[in-house]
Image: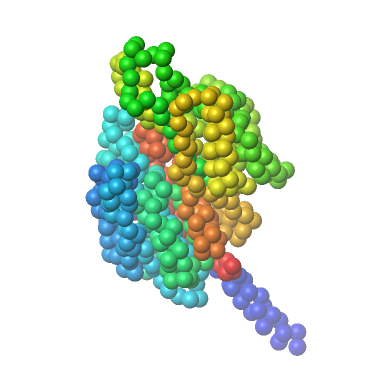
Amino acid sequence: MMKIWKIPSILLVLTSIVTSHPDHLFEYEKLSQYVDSQQEQYVQTLRDWVAVESDSSDVLRRPDCHRMMNMTAEKLRVMGGMVDLVDIGIQELPDGKTVALPKVVTAQFGSDQRKQTVCVYGHVDVQPAKLEDGWATDPYNLTDINGNLYGRGASDNKAPVLAWIHTVEAYQALNIELPVNVKFVIEGMEETGSNGLDAMITAQRDTFFSDVDYIIISDCGWLSRRPALTYGTRGNCYFFAEVEGPKQDLHSGVYGGTVIEPMTDLIGILDTLISPSGQILIPGIREAVAPLSDQEWKMYQDIEFDIDNFKSKIGVSQLMYNNKVDLLAHRWRYPTVTIHGIDGAFSGPGTKTVIPAKVIAKFSIRQVPDMDPAMVKKQVTDYLNSVFAKRKSPNKLKVTMVIGAKPWLAETKHPLYEAGKAAVKRVFNVEPDLIREGGTIPIAKTFEDVTGKSIIMLPIGGFDDGLHSQNEKMSRYNYIEGTKLFIAYLHEVAHLKKD
């Protein structure tokens, strides 16, 4: 009798192991080797994409943005995806003219209702770049130097978008069934605020996004050489402060000493925004920030980060803070004020003895939980108006908030992050750092609020990629190994229980 009962029991155990540990079905090595074999083709595709000057901030480059979206759609179409170019309307320019926004590319691979469905978000527009800005190479000609692929948009965000596309291609090329259904949402206006995308997501909430289980964003980078998973971003409240005085610019010799100058007023009120030590002076801002928990302090303590390397990379001898936890906390989870520039001020080479009649300061506040953009707008406007009033100036002040992007924060104990840890461990054989991002990815909060889906940011960009800067690059290593990471991640996500 004992022998009769033992056999089913063993079979039951074996069945349980097969069901709960399907790694034996995952042909990772085969997929990894295929990715290695395609390395030169992947680099060439990135070269073709970088060659398109899809600068969304320059209206004259708008045809390139349209071309970039068409290239993206065609790439996905050739792969057999269900592809759509979604018209998101027009953009009104400051002079009242209008121009068409680049269409958003959506694509779908697989529709098996038994599988998880992930939606990958990315963008293929770029920041401005010119050789004379200080680039060592032509920013729109991908240049391979010592394993680094230099070019505008290489890391932000063309290579990560391509790595996701190559992920699907690898499964297809080897006739291996995708472990999940994969959808893509790729836009062409991220660098200037994702115009029209919020409305598109809302409009398609009950159609394109209705069967999506998770959303993945790879528009960020690692903090060090250690791979990372990103669980938070700061928001951004961007302001214009305009001071207007005389009806036209004036000669400083003829009129200096007789008029109250708009530039003097502007510099005066800007100086009241933040102290030399970095303390924000606007009432109510610091009080709204969520306190740093003991658990969060411990997480920061364990992150791999070298302060000396950080200083060396950006070329400074001193930072605001001297210890790792304070520095990371003020990069990620505390607000900051940055003054970006002044319109109307003389900024050309040489000398010009002019009193500008109207000057406009541009500054931003990176905001964090639990700050609210509408409240920040009121706090900043009220404060600057009160400071300006004390100057008793005859000039006029106008404060406008032009961007009000919310911060985003995820729960690191969510299964999406456990899947991320497992995928990083498989590909890189290390535990990833859990990090936040000091920059802003507004669409993350929109996805969360509109669709109600869980989100993870899964970066493959390097810590020294120079996003938005001269000599932006993506290393071959991160590009190729990042593709393998995405392959492994889809396998891990396939075995999560649906939310």
* Colour scheme: rainbow
Q: Nearer the viewer, residue 338 or 260?
A: 260
Furthest residue toward right: 1
Residue 183 left/right relative to 3: left
Percent from the top left, x then y, of residue 493? 53, 63
Q: Nearer the viewer, residue 158 or 337?
A: 337
The residue drawn where x is 39% and y is 14% is: 256
Percent from the top left, x then y, of residue 326? 64, 33
Residue 324, image quadrant: top right
Q: Nearer the viewer, residue 9 or 356?
A: 356
The residue drawn where x is 43% and y is 33% is: 242
Q: Is residue 144 visible?
A: no
Residue 140, image quadrant: top left
Q: Is residue 128 visible?
A: yes
Residue 147 left/right relative to 317: left
Counting every numbered tag in the picture gives 0
Vertical order, 347 against 421 (above or below)? above
Vertical order, 209 against 187 (above or below)? below
Percent from the top left, x then y, of residue 445? 52, 54
The residue drawn where x is 54% and y is 43% is: 377
Percent from the top left, x then y, of residue 414? 62, 58
Vertical order, 346 against 467 (above or below)? above
Pick the quarter of the image with the N terminus: bottom right
Residue 20 left/right relative to 196: right
Residue 326 left/right relative to 137: right
Q: Nearer the viewer, residue 92 or 188?
A: 92
The residue drawn where x is 72% and y is 43% is: 294
Pick the quarter of the image with the C terminus: bottom right
Residue 402, image quadrant: top left
